[in-house]
Image: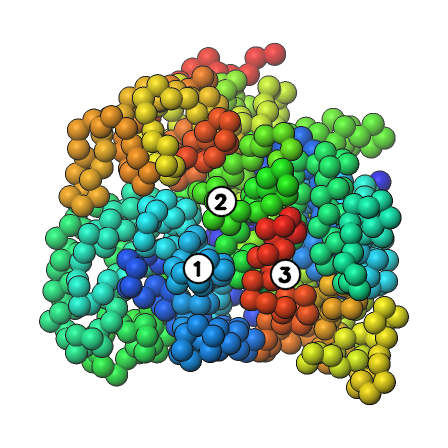
Amino acid sequence: MPNFSPSPFMPLNTASPLPVDILRFNTCGSVDDGKSTLIGRLLYDSKSLMEDQIEALERSADITGGGQINLANLTDGLRAEREQGITIDVAYRYFATPRRKFIIADTPGHVQYTRNMVTGASLANLSIVLVDARLGVIEQSRRHTAIAALLRIPHLVVAVNKMDLVGWSEARFLEIRAQFEEFLPRLDIKDVKFIPMSALNGDNVVDASPHTPWYVGPTLLGHLETVHIASDWNLNGFRLPVQWVNRPNNPTDAALHDFRGFSGQIAGGIVRVGQKIIAFPAGLTTTVKQIWTFDGPVQEAFCPQSVTLVLEHDIDISRGSMLVGLDAHLPGSHADLQAEVCWMHPRPLQTGRKYFLKHTAHTVQVAITEIVSKLNLDTLESGSAPAELAMNDIGEIRLRAAKPLVFDGYATNRLTGSFILIEPGTNTTVAAGMMRPPREIVQTVNADYVI
Amino acid sequence: MSNYHLDHLQHLETEAIHIMREVAGEFERPALLFSGGKDSICLLRLAEKAFRPSEFPMPLLNVDTGHHFPELNEFRDRRAKQLGAKLIIRTVEDAIAKGIAMPAPGEISRNRLQIPTLLAAIDEFRFDCCIGGARRDEEKARAKERFFSFRDSFGQWDPKNQRPEIWNLYNGRLNPGENMRVFPISNWTEMDVWEYIQREQLEVPSIYFSHQRLCVRRAGQWLPVNALQPPKPGEDVRELVVRVRTIGDIISTGCVESPASTMADIIAEIAAARVTERGSRADDKSSEAAMEDRKKAGYF
């Protein structure tokens, strides 16, 4: 029999100072805005770079860079990238300060920017949009901001970079801020911070710049360390997509013989022992008997913890089922869906095509029934129905699923309101989708469990 | 659990458990790559958290190069037994004997030969998914790899053509012969791994702690003196107090001089470290794209 108790090995050192939480952010900007330089600067100035990494930079500087250290080489990891001086895909970087741990998704700004940015930013707490102070707001700045808004990233930083090249002009900084404020009200972003900086020289990245006495706000790192992210997770409306049915099927251990738990990561809200829940698609209600974890049973658990629930009644529940709290807002359940999608594949989206849709732990077949509109990322307005959506297009579509999905609108819950589309045959992920709010919520009358 | 707040280790843990369970849910015949090294030690604890009170829904798999540290193999076998897990071992030695792996003339390193050995094991057991303990902070090519890393029927990774990975929705669909490598601790750093081992009070092989060892100076590193590549006359050989920071084969794993004899010492040492963990692995130093090239060929 396996030994379930932790091995008694080393005493826990409680004196070890642990950072309190993790902030995920992504950087976006167009080709020469200095994204990679900014990340390099953050790592370099926060002393997160190691000697062998700096050595490797110097080695490649001698070979390809004419002796100049290129901080961008830190994130451009693949051979083709270094050879062509471009960033192909999303690169992840990690650093920590005594206050926080950080996960950076460095998303390239050139071709395929939408696809890459959606990939890198989907789980981010914060997006940094880089703007070249000489150029001000350009098409790409608007697009990146719009995508951040669409993905409902809670916090936005506008990094006005290369301020050294405009003589550290406060007037120029305010001008760019005004350009943003022209279109920001049309996007649903609650928290925006503008920071003047020079990533190349390190001004206002980690250390405050002597060149901006007129700027009283925090440095970029100061902001990243203190921005309030505790409310970024959804604690309203319990949702548990069931990933795996936990059945030990152990004939020799009486305690485990009848154990039947439902394992998953809580995608919203809080669950408590004794709480009434409803299980979909069965549509039957029951109560939570036990919240099982490896570290012992708990009285309550919350998003995004991974738990195993034991329920009072024996209901038909399997992978893809959804357990929902009855004490807060309820999800919808439809086979006809409406959603915004970001198309990510060279073969365009067309009406009538069939795909697999993966939503939470549930995969169903869907057919595209209508392309309703395409978003113009420059004007931020929805245009009339196009014939197809091409790679990097964002549009609103209708789909018909082979079975009803239990979901929330993406604006209510990023985890139960999102999905991907998978092309049959190639199995490629071709789209990221965000559900519109359900037309009506599920009905719970006559849902009581009956033996 | 008050305040509904997760610290960074709890956050990384719940992400990894979610990924483990997705593997159990999406694949027919998964395996978990367990070497006995610190990263895969964390994987086993995560598997316990994901699947208990049930047995693991997958066996453990190890490719034994024949050049492992004996302390590592002893620990590997003992830990698997403790957990009641099935451990499958396939050896490079055996793969060479069967003609699956072909050493180049004079080739001593087993690094390259692990690849055909692993692919043959995947074939033999028809594994459709292998969970591995790779982390993105280890190396620049890994920094670009997905949690679910698709491999074609030759086991190859195509970095330019990876599936987009969005929210926590992982696409595990495969055609016959294709394979997935899944890395639940992609987002963990070396420090996170040690802090987790400390918090969970996990045992690790003794060579991670300070010990006396006869070492030979080669290419700027102290390598353990071993029978495979014995010291040549004129080489600098010394008895040192060392530990290993990352475990590879005995012929390529650099030892660092260190007095760290407890978990707290190790954490303090890493916090103050000025070189990365892979700085002590000769196999990664051969060129800037060494890891990228091995991954493209089917490496873990």
Locate residue B190 relative to residue A446 in the image: left or right. Answer: right
Q: Position of residue A72 (x, y in %)?
A: 40, 67
Q: Single out the mark in the foreground, 1 or 3.
A: 1
Please, what is the three-letter code of the amino acid marked with disc 2? Answer: Gln
Q: Position of residue A202 (x, y in %)?
A: 33, 77
Residue carrying label 3: B193
Which residue is rendered at x = 77% and y = 36% of the image?
B124
Distance of label 3 from label 2 (alpha carbons)? 26 Å
Image position of B62 with respect to B241: above or below:
above
Q: Residues within 10 Å of mark 2 (few under 14, many from 20)?
A: some
Q: Residue B236 has which mark?
A: none
| Quadrant of residue A224 within the rendered picture | bottom left
Q: Is residue B216 visible?
A: yes
SS assignment at label 1: helix
Distance of label 1 from label 2 (alpha carbons)? 15 Å
For disc 1, the chain is: A
Q: Residues within 10 Å of mark 1 (few under 14, many from 20)?
A: some
Q: Position of residue B283 (x, y in %)?
A: 68, 66
Please, what is the three-letter code of the amino acid marked with disc 1? Answer: Glu
Q: Single out the mark in the foreground, 1 or 2.
A: 1
Which residue is rendered at x = 41% and y = 71% of the image?
A71
Q: Single out the mark in the foreground, 3 or 2.
A: 2
Locate residue B65 relative to residue A209 in the image: left or right. Answer: right
Which quarter of the figure is the C terminus of chain A placed in?
top right
Residues at discs 3 and 2 both on one chain: yes
Which quarter of the figure is the N terminus of chain A placed in?
top right
Residue carrying label 2: B162
